[in-house]
Image (cartoon, grey):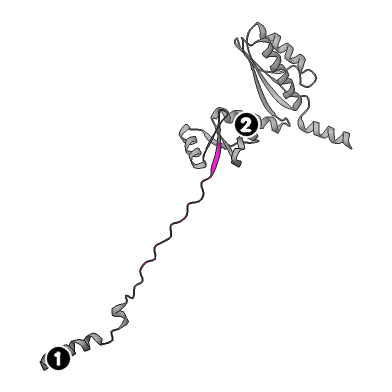
Amino acid sequence: MAFLVNRCASRLSRILQPRSCASFMSTEREPVPEKKKKKPPEVRVNLIENKNLTVMSLESANKLANHKGVQLALVEEPAHWMLVGNRQAYELLSPGSKVASKKEDDMKALGFKGLKKAIFSTNIQDNDVQTKLKQISKWVSAGYVVDIALDKSEKSEDIRAKLEEAIKDTAKLPGSVKRNSNTLLRVQYQPIETVKSKKDVKKETSQ
């Protein structure tokens, strides 16, 4: 009996002996899990294509431009409807569009407001001719250079004569012929005054 008591006492004393902290606590700290980085907010834009507006991310718009082999460009002087939702307006520019954009810039560099185009087809109706002539007259008066394309027909010379009569006080005449083939006549008309010269005249008269 005494033997059993001594044996139990020996085991109890070993259990109660103080142990070093190292035996209970690991010296290595557990790795703190990294916080997931927040993704930057997605930039949403209005993509203008063929006068249609599509809302998409800027990243998706870039991918679409690359897929089509065109350039994604910010719309200069966008119309009010293009900025719906206070988003920036972008457009897809093909090589042909780039050429047109360069011509527009060239006209602005010369002091004009920009470049406009008008086409008169062979089967155009008389009332449509009058509407276009009024529009072209407004463009020239506002300081735009206007490119006119006319399908060669019996009407084409008559239309050109009416046009030059309508803009005789605001455009340099005769117009500059850019192309004259069996099927097409292209003529360019420049305003007599550039936008800059108009502003200078207004300043002088106001002084």
* Residue positioned most to the front: 1
* Residue positioned most to the top: 154
Q: Main secondary structure of the magenta part?
A: loop
Circle nearer the viewer, 1 or 2: 1
Vertical position of residue 163 compared to residue 22: above or below: above
Tell me the amino acid under the disc marked 2.
Lys
Q: Residues within 10 Å of mark 2 (few under 14, many from 20)?
A: few
* Marks 1 & 2, CB-CB < 8 Å contact: no
- What are the residue bounds of the magenta stretch? 30-46
Q: Residue at x 14, y 89 (%)?
A: 7
Tell me the amino acid under the disc marked 1.
Val
Q: Report which quarter residue 10 is drawn in.
A: bottom left
At which x and y percent is residue 126?
68, 10
Q: How far apart are the two marked residues, 1 and 2, measured between alpha carbons?
A: 106 Å
Q: Residue at x 88, y 36 (%)?
A: 206
What mark, if any, has residue 5 been given in the picture?
Answer: 1
Q: Secondary structure at mark 1?
A: helix
At which x and y percent is residue 135?
71, 21
- The answer to whether residue 78 of the structure is visible from this angle is no
The foreground one among 138 and 15 is 15
Q: Report which quarter residue 109 is drawn in.
A: top right
Q: Secondary structure at mark 2?
A: helix
- Which is nearer the N-term, disc 1 or disc 2? 1
Find out whether residue 99 is within the magenta segment.
Answer: no
Find out whether residue 31 is within the magenta segment.
Answer: yes
Question: According to the image, label 2 marks what residue?
Answer: 102
Q: Is residue 59 found left or right of 33 in the rendered image?
A: right
Position of the N terminus, as image quadrant, is bottom left
Q: Residue at x 11, y 92 (%)?
A: 3
